[in-house]
Image (spheres, helix red, strand yellow):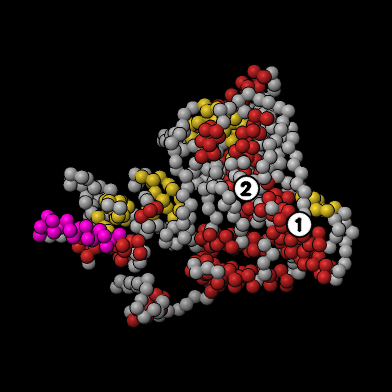
Amino acid sequence: MLIYTFSKYNDNRPLVIHLKEQLEDQGFIIKPRPNKEVMELLVAGEENRYTRRLITLICRFISNFKVNGYNADEFNRMYHSTQNVRSRLFLDICNDCYLEYERWLKENKAVDFEDMINESARILKEVKDMKQKLDFKYIIVDEYQDISRQRFDLTKALADVTDAKIIAVGDDWQSIYAFSGSDITLFTKFAEKMGYAKQLKIIKTYRNSQDVIDIAGGFIQKNTSQISKRLISPKTIEDPVLIYTYDGKAKAKNNERRSGSNYALAYAVQTCIQELIKYKKKEGKKVGTILLLGRYGFDGNNLERTGLFEFQYKTSKVKSVKYPNLNITFMTAHSSKGLGYDDVIIINGKNETYGFPSKVEDDPVLSFVLKGDNSIDYAEERRLFYVAMTRTKNRVFVVAPEQNPSEFLLELKHDYKSVRLNGNWDENYVAKTNRKACPICGYPMQLKYKPAYGLPLYICTNEPEVCGFMTNDLKAGKLAIQKCDQCRDGYLIARRANNEYFLGCTNYKKDGTGCNRMMSKEYYYRGMGYSLDEGDIRQHSVQRMKTYASCIDKQAKTFPSEYVKIKN
C-alpha cells in the first residue's frame, strides 16, 4: 500500500493530520515519541550536520543580538518587520533559545562578554541620571575602526559622565570585522554620531614601499565612502606586485599526489619563493620572513596535500621541501592584521565561492543583527585584500588560476602598470557572483559552472532541500531549469524569442533532428501556482495576438502546440 500526501489541501488542514488519518485507516497505531527522544535521534543521526548548522546560526545571531544592545522585546519587532515565513520561524526558535540562555545565565550567576559591556553602559547611564561626574581627562579607544554599536554606546556613556576627550585611533581602510558586529560608519561618521570632533591623519608609513602603498591605497579608495588620504613612505622598490598563474583546471591522475589543480597551485607558490630568492640575490639581501596568506584556513591544508610543503597547524609554520631552511608562516588574511613580514605571498587569487573576494553569503536572517556595507561591491573584502597587501615590507606575490582569476587582481593589473603578470589568464572572465535574490525564497544567487548542464548557472544558495532553484538567465523570472520529459539527456532551460521567455530543450536543433520540447512562461507559472505580473500578462496577450494572426495568414488547419498550451 502506497500512502501519499500533498503539500497543500483544499480543507487547509496540515499535511501531517492527513497523513495520520491515512495511516490509522490502514491499521497503523500512532505512538508519538517524547521530544527528548526525538532530539537525541536528530543529534545522533546522519542528518545532524543540519542541527549543528542551526545551532551555530542561533549562537551567532544571539551573540550579535547582544552586541547591538537589544532586549527580548526586539524579537517581536523583528518578527513583524518581515513576511518571510522562514525568517519568522527562525525568530520564533531563536527567541526561545535566547530566553532559555538568559535564564541559565541568571540561575548560574554568570555573565557573558557582551553583557559585561551592556551592563557597564547601563550603570554609566544611571550615574548620568544621578548627575554625577567621573574624573577622567582622556578616553583612548584603539582599533576604533572595528567598534560595534554596544562598544560605541559604552564610549558615548563614558563621554556623558566625564569631561574627558575621546580619542579614537584607527584606520577605516582596515575595518574587517563586520561578521562580529563592527559598524564602519561609527568611524567614518564619527563627528556626526559623537558630536564635535577634529580629524588628524597619520600619513607616513615605514613598513610598505611607496610603490606598494600607492597600489594598495588606490585600490581601497575605489570605495569613495572610505576616508581619503595619501600615504607617504621613504622606501621604493622595483616590481612591487607580481602575479603568477597556474592551471586551475588541471586534472588529478590516478590519485597521484603530484597532479591536479592543488598541485599546480602549490608549484606556483614554490615558483614565487624561487623568484623571491632571485630578487634578494640581485639586491644583495638575505631572504627574511615569508608570509603565505590565504582567505581561509584550509588554503594552508591544500598546500600540504601536494607533498611540496609541510604545514604545522598549531605553530602556523610552513616548510618548503625544496627550500627547507626558509622561515615561512601561513595565516589567513584576518589573522595577519597588525603584523608585518619581509615578503608576502597571497595564495588564493581565485574568483570562486571560497576565493578572494569570498563569495560566501551570510544567512539572510543575520541581516537583523549585522550591519552590512553596500557602499561598493565586496566592500569589506576589498578592505581585507588591502590588509593582505600591506603586510609586506618589500614585495607582494600573488598566485591565481589562469581560467578564473580574482576580479581584484584583474582590476590591479588593469589600473597599474607596475603590477606584473607572469603567465597567462583570461582577461574576459566575468564569473562574478550576482547578488540578486532568488525569486522563489529570497536567498542570494551565485553563478557557478555546472559541467552536467554544459553552461554557467545561477543557483540559489539556500539548502537544496528547501529551494533548489536554478536558472541560466536571471531575467527569465521564476523559470527554473527542468529535466526534459521528451528526450533522454536534455534539460529545459530559459530561452528567449520575440522578447518572450520560455523553457526550451538543450537538445534543440534548427533542422528538426533534435528535441523541440518547449514550455511557455504562462503555462509553467500556472502549473507551479505562480502569478504572472502585469508586464508578463501584457506580453503574453500581445504574443497570443501575433501567433493567432500568423495562423490565420497561413490559413493553418491546426494551431502550433505552444499556442494551444497558452490558450488552455
**Residue type indicated by callout 2:** Ser
Residue indicated by mark 2: 225
- Say whether residue 553 is magenta: yes
Residue segment shown in magenta = 539-557
Q: Nearer the viewer, residue 439 or 567?
A: 567
Q: Which residue sits at x=55%, y=30%?
A: 243
Residue indicated by mark 1: 195
User: Horizontal and vertical percent for residue 516?
Assistant: 21, 51
Q: Secondary structure at mark 1?
A: loop
User: Horizontal and vertical percent for residue 500?
Assistant: 30, 55
Residue 539, by quadrant, is bottom left
Question: Does residue 493 appear to the left or right of 278 in the view shown?
Answer: left
Q: Which residue sits at x=39%, y=79%?
A: 12
**Is 418 rendered above or below residue 449?**
above
User: Horizontal and vertical percent for residue 429?
Assistant: 44, 38
Q: Mark 2 or mark 1, which is nearer the start of the sequence?
A: 1
**Residue type indicated by callout 1:** Gly
Do residues under tags 1 and 2 come within 8 Å of each other at their CB atoms? no
Q: How far is mark 1 from mark 2, CA to CA?
A: 20 Å
Q: Secondary structure at mark 2?
A: loop
- Main SS of residues in magenta: helix
Q: Which residue sits at x=35%, y=72%?
A: 6
Observer able to see residue 303:
no
- The number of numbered discs placed on residues in the rendered structure image is 2
